Image: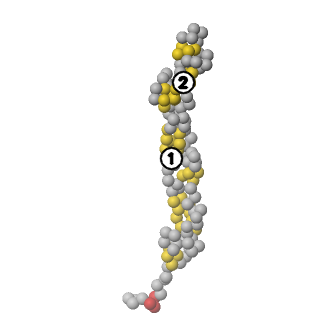
Amino acid sequence: MFYYGNQCDRYCKARDDERGHYRCNPVTGEKICLFGWGSDDCLTNLDDCNGHRCHDGATCMDHIGYYTCKCPPGRTGVYCDGEINECASSPCHNGGTCVDESNGFTCECPEGWAGLLCEIKIVPCKVDNCVHVS
């Protein structure tokens, strides 16, 4: 059925292609845009990022009928509302304490250890081993 209205004078054929994205009102035959489409001809992709829920500097990516969030480094989740815990893998060695940061971590090394991961043993110089002692 492609004609609608009291006089059967309203033509409407549902479509979802480059010429429109709509269905027809079964009584009046007026176009009803499919989800994600708007305007009189139902050819305008609505901006689904209006009122988005992306968090903490995430970028909203508009699609047809939905959006996705592109997370910045250090964030995770559908809306980027979760922080990645870089300390979860216990990256610090030799008793170092991991401190999680917004996009990475640092290791606080115990006495006698140094390096990004506390992997370098510090060997103190003994005074009697030094050649140039005054």
- Residue 44 appears in the picture as rendered: no
Q: Is residue 93 above or below residue 71?
A: below
Q: Residue at x 57, y 74 (%)?
A: 94
For badge 1, the amino acid type reads Lys
**For residue 5, side relative to residue 43 (left or right):** right
The reply to whether the C-beta atoms of the residues labelled 1 and 2 are less than 8 Å apart is no
Quarter placement of the N terminus: top right
Q: Residues within 10 Å of mark 2 (few under 14, many from 20)?
A: some
Gap in Å between the C-alphas at discs 1 and 2?
Answer: 34 Å
Q: Residue at x 51, y 49 (%)?
A: 71
Q: Is residue 49 above or below residue 81?
A: above
- Residue where numbered disc 1 is placed: 70
Q: Position of residue 85 (x, y in %)?
A: 58, 58
Quarter placement of the C terminus: bottom left
- Residue where numbered disc 2 is placed: 14
Q: Residue at x 54, y 35 (%)?
A: 65
Which element type, helix, strand or loop, lies under badge 1? strand
For badge 2, the amino acid type reads Ala
Which element type, helix, strand or loop, lies under badge 2? loop
Between 109 and 34, the one nearer to me in the picture: 34
- Residue 4 appears in the picture as rendered: yes
Between 9 and 91, the one nearer to me in the picture: 9
**For residue 28, side relative to residue 126 (left or right):** right
Q: Is residue 131 above or below residue 90?
A: below
Q: Position of residue 60 (x, y in %)?
A: 50, 41
